[in-house]
Image: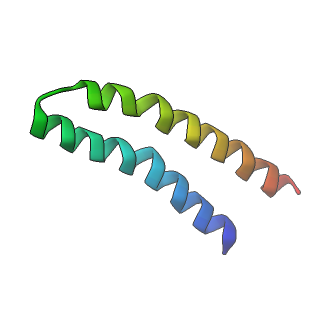
Amino acid sequence: MGKKISKVRIGVVLIGLPLVFVIVSIITKDWRYLTWSIPPALMSCWTALVVLRKQEES
């Protein structure tokens, strides 16, 4: 159960966070919001995937 929740959280961060910033960028017509949201989302997802893989190995 915990692993499934972790995968859902990763999906929310990977898709949801940039999606929010896409909406903000479309509304404000300032694409820097989207540009600055992608690296943190990718870094947090990478970290979460590494932790999840280590949990699955154990």
Residue 8 on image: x %, y %: 52, 61
Q: What colour scheme does the image use?
A: rainbow
Residue displayed at 30% across by 31% down: 34
Residue closest to the far bottom: 1
Quadrant where the image shows the N terminus: bottom right
Query: As drawn, which residue projects farthest toward the right?
Result: 58
In the rendered image, residue 22, in percent from the top left (x then y), is placed at: 24, 39
> On the rendered structure, is 26 left or right of 42?
left
Q: Exactly how many numbered labels are in the figure?
A: 0
Reply above or below: 55 against 44: below
**Left or right of 6 on screen, residue 15:** left
| Camera-side residue of 38 and 58 | 38
Tell me the quadrant of the picture where the C terminus can be found: bottom right
Determine the residue positioned at 37% across, 51% down.
Answer: 16
| 8 to 52, vertically: above or below | below
Q: Position of residue 35 (x, y in %)?
A: 33, 25
Determine the image quadrant of residue 36.
Answer: top left
Residue 15 in the image, given as x and y percentages of width and height: 39, 47
Q: State the residue at coordinates (44%, 55%).
A: 12
> Of residues 1 and 25, which is closer to you in this image?
25
Q: Residue at 19% across / 35% down in the picture?
A: 25
Can you tell which quarter of the image residue 7 is in?
bottom right
